[in-house]
Image (cartoon, rainbow, N blue to C red):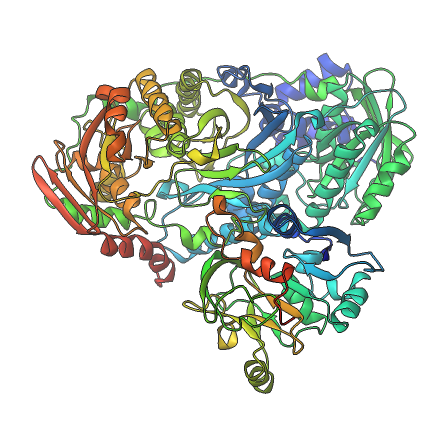
Amino acid sequence: MRLAVIVFPGSNCDLDLYEALHTVCGADVEYVSHKATSLAGFDGVMIPGGFSYGDYLRAGAIARFAPVMKEVIRLAKAGAPVFGTCNGFQILTEAGLLPGALKKNDSQRFVCKTVALEVVNNQTRFTHQYTAHERINLPIAHADGSFYADQATLDQLEANGQVVFRYAEENPNGSLNNIAGITNAAGNVLGMMPHPERAVEAILGNTDGLRLFKSLLTPAAAD
Amino acid sequence: MKQAMTPEEIKAQKPYLDWSLSEREYNYIAEELLGRLPNYTETGLYSAMWSEHCSYKKSKPVLRLFPNKNARVLQGPGEGAGVVDIDDGQAVVFKAESHNHPSTVEPYQGAATGVGGILRDIFSMGARPIASLDSLHFGELDNPTMKMKVQDTVKGIGDYGNCMGIPTIAGETTFDPCYSGNLLVNAMSVGLMDQKHLQKGTANGIGNAVMYVGAKTGRDGIHGATFASADFSDENATQRSAVQVGDPFMEKLLMEACLELIEQHADWLVGIQDMGAAGIVSSSAEMASEGQAGMELNLDLVPQREPNMSAYEIMLSESQERMLLCVVKGHEADVQAIFKNYDLEAVVIGRITAGHDYVLHHDGQEVCHIPVSTLTDDVLEEASEEREPARLKAAKQAPAWVPGIKDAGATLRQLLAQSTIADKSVFFEQYDSMVRTSTVVGPGSDAGVLRVRGTRKGLAMTTDGNGRFVYLDPEIGGKMALTEAAANLIATGAEPLAITDCLNYGDPTDPEIFWELHHSVMGMAEACRVFDTPVISGNVSLYNENNGQAIHPTPMVGMVGLIKNLDRVIPMAAQHAGDAVYLLGQTGDDFAGSELQKLLTGDIAGALADFDLQATRDNFHRLLAEMQAGHIASAHDLAEGGLGVGLAEILFKTELGVNLTLTLTKDQFFAETAGRMIVTVPVEHTAAFEAALGTAVTKVGEVTNSHWLQVRLADGQVNENVQALQTIWEEAIPCQLKSKD
C-alpha cells in the first residue's frame, strides 16, 4: 500500500506522520505537495496536523481549496483510505469528506496533554487491531477541537457506528457526545483530533497509537 | 526624499538624545569617525547600532569574564547562536533572548515575537529548531492586570511556537512583586544540525547580491533596540509603537525556505542573518563588517507595507519574519525560485562593493555614506561606576533569620500552594510539547529531554534564574544559578555541555546595579569554569525598571546537556517501593532568600552562605557515572522549598510514598542549600552507589507503597497524604487565576 502524506503550507506534523508510517511501521509513504494535481499511484492519503495557512480565516478552511484536494476527494470517493489527524480532521470536514465541524475549545485555549479515549468502533479499517471498547491514551494538541454537528447528523453518526473514538474521562474541548474521531458513512475516511502518530514508540512513553497504523497497513480479512 | 532635519539642525537641536545616543558619542562620531556632521539618517543608524541592545557597550567589559571556549564549542558568542559539537558530525545550536520591554507593554505580541526572533537566530545558523524553552518572571497573581499579562504572555508563546511546530519542552515561571512593573520574558531555542551546514552572518565578494527575504517592512518596532535600552516610567507608557507584531505562519514558510536553501544549495549562499534588533541596518552592517566588505543598498527596492516610509524608518524597522542573505552573483534567480515556491518574496536590494563603505540610496539620493566599521566596531565602550549596594553590607551584619517552624506538615502544604512552587501545567499545557515526536521528557520535570532521531543520543535542556538569591548576594547567587541548571541536567542523566544566558538587570548607570551585574557575572563565570560549561551565546537586558524601581538582578541560565545513551534517561519521580532514598549534599541553615522566608515573612532578606562549587561538581559527576552504570531509579534536584517540597514532587502522579528518618530540623527540611539532590536507588545497587558516592550521600529511608510522605525529623515529624498534597499543588494557580481580585 503506497501512502501520500500531504504537506500544506503550515503543516507541521507531516514529519511525525511520515516517521510513524515509514520508520516505525515500514510503510511505503511519500510526502506530496499541496500543489500536486495528481495522486495517481497512491492507495491512501494521510493528512497531517499543524496550522495549514496559519489557520487564518478558520482552521482548514483555506486548505480545502488547495489543488491536491480534488485528488484527495477523488480517492476518498473511490473508497481509498483517507486519514486526517488534528488539522487534517479539520480539513476533511471543511472539504465535506466528513460531516460536522470543529469549533474552538470550550476553554478558548490551546491544550496539549494525553487524554483517555474509548475505541467505540473497532470494526473499521483503521481500528480492527483494537478490542471493542478498549481504553487507550493518546496525546491531543489543538485549539479548535470541539466537534459539532446538528442533532440529526449526530444521531446518524451514532446509529451507523461512525463514532470511532470518544473521550473516555475528561472531555478536553467540549465536543458533542464526547466525540474524538469519526468516519464517513462508507468507513474509508477517518478524522480524529488526537494524534496517534505521537504514540508509536516506547522511548516516547506511549505506543497506544501504533495499532491504528498497523490496522491500516494490514487489512483485516473482512476488508 | 529630503532628510527630516539638516546636519546643522541635528547638531543644534540634539534629537539624538531622545534616541539614547549621548552628546559625547555624537561628538565622537562627528569629529573622530566622520570628520563631518552626520545627516539625519546616519544619526539614526548610529543611535540604533550604538545602543546597549546592539553594541553591549556597557556590559562588554563584564561579559569578557565569561569563558566561551572548550573542545566542543564550534561557534561562540557573536553569531546568531552558539554551536556545540555533539559527535557524529552533528551539532546543537542554541541561544536565549529577552523580550522584556515589549512584553511589559504588550505581553501577547511581545512574547510571541520573542519566540519568533530567537527561532530565526537558530535557523539562520543552518540548524532546524527542535525545541523552545522559556523563563518567565511575573508580579504576584493578586490583581486582574497581572493575571491578564500572565495569560497573554503564555498565549503569545504558545500561539507562535505551536504554529511553527516546535515543541516547548521546559522552562520556569516565577512570581515576585519586583517584576510587577517590568516582566521578564526570556525565550530560548535549541536547534540541531549537521556541522557541514553551519552558516555565518557574513557578506563579501564584490558584485555579490544582498537579498531581502520574507515579510514586508512596516513602521512597527522602530527603535525597538533603543526602547530596550531605556527604563519604563509612567511618562513613556505610550511606547506601544515600538512593539512588533508576529506572524508565525510567515515564519514557518521562511524557515522551510531558508533551510532548503542552506541544506541543498549552500554554494549559492555567502552568508545569512536574521533581521532582529535594529532591523536592516544591524543585519547588513554586521554582515559587511564580518566579511570586511563594502555594501551599497537601494532602499527603494525594500518591500514595504506602508507608503512614504523614510530611509530612517526603513532601516530601523523591526518588522518580523525577515532575513538578509548574501548570494553569489548569478544565483539571484535561483534563490528567488526557492522562495517563490513558498510564496515568499526574495528581492535584491544591493550589492557588495569594493572598499569598506556603507552606502544607502533612497528616492534617488544618497542618504548615508559612512565606513561600515563605525557602526559595528568603533562603539565607545563605557566604563561604568560601581558600588556595593548598601543593603548587602547591612545584611552581612544583621543576625540570621530563624524560621522557627512549629508544624512542618502545615508548612509543606502552604509552600506547595506558593505560586512559584505550585503546578504550572495550566500554563505549559497551552504549549505543544510533543510535536516533532522526539520529546522523551516534557514540561514539569527538572529538564526537558529530546531524543536525537536516528541515534541513541539525547539532549537535555533547562532554564534557571533565581533573582532572589542574586539580589541577596550577586556572586553567590550567580554561582547558584549555574549550579541549579547543572543539577537539573544531571538529574536527567545528562552531561552539561554549555550555556546561553539572558542577563536581566535594572539601570546600569546606577552604580549599585552595575555592581550587581559585575559580581553576578563573576560568580556565574567561576561556576562555568568549574562545570566546564562555556557561555556560547546570550543577551543582556538592562534598564528593567518601572518608576525607578529595579527588578531583582535576574541572570537566566539556559543550559544544554548530552545524554549518550537514551536507555539511561533518569526519571524525576520515584519508581518502585523498596528503593532506598538518599540525600546528596549537605544541608545547612540556608533560609535567606528561600520560599520559606517569603512565605513566613512576606519578603526576603539576609546573607547567603558560600558553598563549595568543586565539591558539588564532583558529587554531580560521580552521580552521573552511577546513572550511566544503571544504578539509579530516580533523581530530582532540590530547589524552591527545599527537601520537603522536593520529596512531594517525586511522589506526585505516582502511587508511592516515602518513609524517612532525618537528622535535619523542621526548619532545615525547607532550607534551600545549593547542590543537593534526592536520589532513589534499587536495593541491589545500594552498595555500589554508596561506594561510589561515599560521604556525599546520606541514606535517609525508603520508597513505600502507602502514598504517604512520612518523615521523622530531629525535632518533629511530617505525616502527609500525597494525594492531598498534590491537590493543593495542582489547584493553587488555577484558583488564583479564577479569584476575582
Q: Residue at x 76, y 38 (%)?
A: B260
Viewer-proximal residue among B310 and A93:
A93
Residue B367 visible in the snapshot: no
Viewer-proximal residue among B135 and B62:
B135
Residue B696 is left or right of residue B206, and the answer is left
Q: Residue at x 28, y 53 (%)?
A: B726
Q: Count of labels shown?
A: 0
Q: Position of residue B130 (x, y in %)?
A: 59, 40
Position above or below: B259 against B610: below
**Would you identify the image quadrant in which residue B512 lies?**
top left
Residue B646 is left or right of residue B92, and the answer is left
**Would you identify the image quadrant in which residue B41 lies?**
top right
Position above or below: B677 against B132: above
Quadrant holding the C terminus of chain B = bottom left
Residue A89 is left or right of residue B605, and the answer is right
Most extreme residue toward the front is A221
Residue B386 visible in the snapshot: yes
**Would you identify the image quadrant in which residue A147 lies?**
bottom right
Most extreme residue toward the bottom is A152
Q: Position of residue B82 (x, y in %)?
A: 59, 25
Quadrant holding the N terminus of chain B = top right
Q: Residue at x 41, y 52 (%)?
A: B425
Residue B126 is left or right of residue B646, and the answer is right
Viewer-proximal residue among A20 and A219:
A219
Most extreme residue toward the left is B715
Q: Position of residue B584 (x, y in %)?
A: 26, 28
Q: Position of residue A55 (x, y in %)?
A: 66, 60
